[in-house]
Image: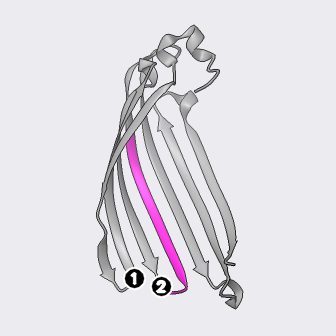
Amino acid sequence: MDDDDIEERFDSLARDGWLHQAQVEYAFSLGRGISIAPGFQFSVADLDGNANSYKGYNLRVGLRCFTRSYRMNLTAAVGLNDYDRTHPIFDKTRDDWLYSLFGMFSISELLGNKSLSSTLIAGYRHRDSNIGFLKADTFLGGLTVGYKF
């Protein structure tokens, strides 16, 4: 992170470093073109500031549907980020619970045109922290339109 002024006052809040993640997922077929995919993700945020370093645990489940004309992927997840040290400003060791939903719907041959395609993306994440100041809601949305030459 460039130009992070907080670390000049509190070394333990430095955010520069590495985030390592490993994920395991397996898709179970529920029928032709439909699958459910549970998974687990483990994260280690190895940051210069110990109060911002954490180990993360995330459980997720995805539903995927595929046909010739469309693809849909819905994912729900819940996770915990367990921080290493006491936050110097709030005098607590931070713990964050994360809840998220993400969806993507893609369609080929948009409006009957074989060269057009489109994807709609929507997502939501809620971070519930034991430090009230750090609670957050994040929304994501997008729409793409593609043309194949």
Q: Which residue lies furthest to the front in this view?
A: 149
In this rendering, the answer to whether 82 lies above or below 123 is above
Task: State left or right for residue 141 relative to residue 22.
Answer: right
Which residue range is magenta in the image? 68-80
Q: Point out residue 98 in the picture as x, y percentages from the top left corner.
A: 45, 44
The answer to whether the residue labelled 2 contacts the one labelled 1, judged by CB atoms less than 8 Å apart, is yes
Residue shown at 71%/87% (left/top)? Answer: 111
Residue shown at 50%/74% (left/top)? Answer: 72
Where residue 6 sits, quadrant-wise, is top right
Residue type (three-letter) at the residue carrying disc 1: Gly
In what element is the residue under mark 1? loop
Q: Is residue 75 magenta?
A: yes
Q: Point out residue 120 in the picture as x, y percentages from the top left corner.
A: 63, 68
Q: Quadrant of the C terminus?
A: bottom right
Other residues around mark 2 within 10 Å, as few (<14) / some (14–19) / many (≥20): few
Q: Point out residue 80 in the picture as x, y percentages from the top left corner.
A: 38, 40
Where residue 7 sits, quadrant-wise, is top right
Residue marked by disc 2: 67
Q: Main secondary structure of the magenta part?
A: strand
Where residue 96 sits, quadrant-wise, is top left
Q: Point out residue 37 in the picture as x, y percentages from the top left corner.
A: 34, 66
How far apart, in angstroms, are the residues tagged by discs 2 and 1?
6 Å
Q: Which residue lies furthest to the bottom in this view?
A: 112
In this rendering, the answer to whether 85 lies above or below 68 is above
Residue marked by disc 1: 33
